[in-house]
């Protein structure tokens, strides 16, 4: 790590990826909107990229239709601010626990996937078996990383 420059928390990159996917953007689509390479966006999302400039964070926020100051607060693991989504709630707070175990970024992502599958489930008579399978698979993936 270079002197004087902090690395972004891993949760920041996971949040960027989740917001990008919620918008339905590929890495390439977001990179074009931000005017950086897809590999640069990927490095931000995986936590490999050191702190991007304010301009880049601002452009990412605009492309993803989120408040830049919310992203900056998340990137700095800041104090309380208005929570807009469950993903932001989990990613904003570096110390989230479940059953006494602190959830790392992969566990947070897997937990959000469980919740997403529950929310997406149609839960009708004809879809229930398929819904149960999808939810069970998501739970299994969560338990693997928890």
Image (cartoon, rainbow, N blue to C red):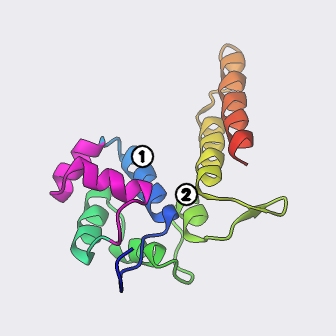
- What residue is drawn where x is 21% and y is 73%? 55
Q: Earlier in the sequence, mark 1 or mark 2?
A: 1
24 or 96, which lies in front? 96
Q: From the viewer's perspective, is residue 33 above or below residue 28?
A: below
**Is the residue 9 above or below the residue 37 in the image?**
below
Residue 107 coordinates in the image, percent (x, y)? 65, 51
Residue at x 69% of width, y 31% of height: 135
141 part of magenta stretch: no
Q: Could you tell me how many numbered marks the image carries?
A: 2
Q: Which residues are magenta?
A: 27-51
Helix, strand or loop for the magenta stretch, by majority: helix
Which residue position holds label 2? 87
The crowding category of the residue bearing disc 2, from other C-alpha atoms within 10 Å (few below 14, some 14 to 19, many at least 20), is some
* Residue 117 versus residue 90 in the image, above or below: above
Q: Position of residue 108 (x, y in %)?
A: 62, 54
Q: Quadrant of residue 27?
A: top left
Tell whether 85 sits left or right of 64: right
Task: Tell me if mark 1 has few (under 14), some (14-19) or many (20+) residues whose alpha carbon lies within 10 angstroms of its own.
Answer: few
Marks 1/2: CA distance?
11 Å
Q: Which mark is residue 22?
A: 1
Contact between marks 1 and 2 (CB within 8 A): the answer is yes
Answer with the quarter of the image where residue 69 lies: bottom left
Percent from the top left, x then y, of residue 136? 73, 29
Q: Quadrant of the N terminus?
A: bottom left
| Magenta highlight on residue 46 | yes
Name the residue rendered at 26%, 58% in the picture: 63
Could you say whether the residue bearing mark 1 is in a helix, strand or loop? helix
């Amino acid at each position: 790590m270079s002197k004087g420059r902090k690395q972004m928390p891993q949760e920041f990159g996971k949040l960027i990826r989740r917001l990008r996917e919620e918008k339905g953007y590929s890495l390439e689509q977001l990179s074009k909107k931000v005017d950086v390479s897809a590999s640069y966006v990927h490095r931000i999302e995986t936590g490999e990229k050191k702190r991007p400039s304010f301009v880049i964070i601002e452009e990412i926020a605009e492309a993803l239709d989120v408040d830049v100051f919310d992203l900056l607060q998340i990137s700095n693991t800041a104090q309380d601010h208005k929570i807009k989504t469950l993903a932001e709630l989990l990613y904003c707070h570096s110390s989230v626990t479940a059953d006494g175990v602190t959830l790392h970024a992969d566990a947070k992502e897997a937990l959000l996937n469980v919740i997403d599958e529950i929310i997406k489930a149609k839960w009708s008579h004809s879809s229930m078996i398929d819904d149960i399978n999808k939810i069970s698979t998501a739970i299994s993936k969560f338990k693997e990383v928890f």
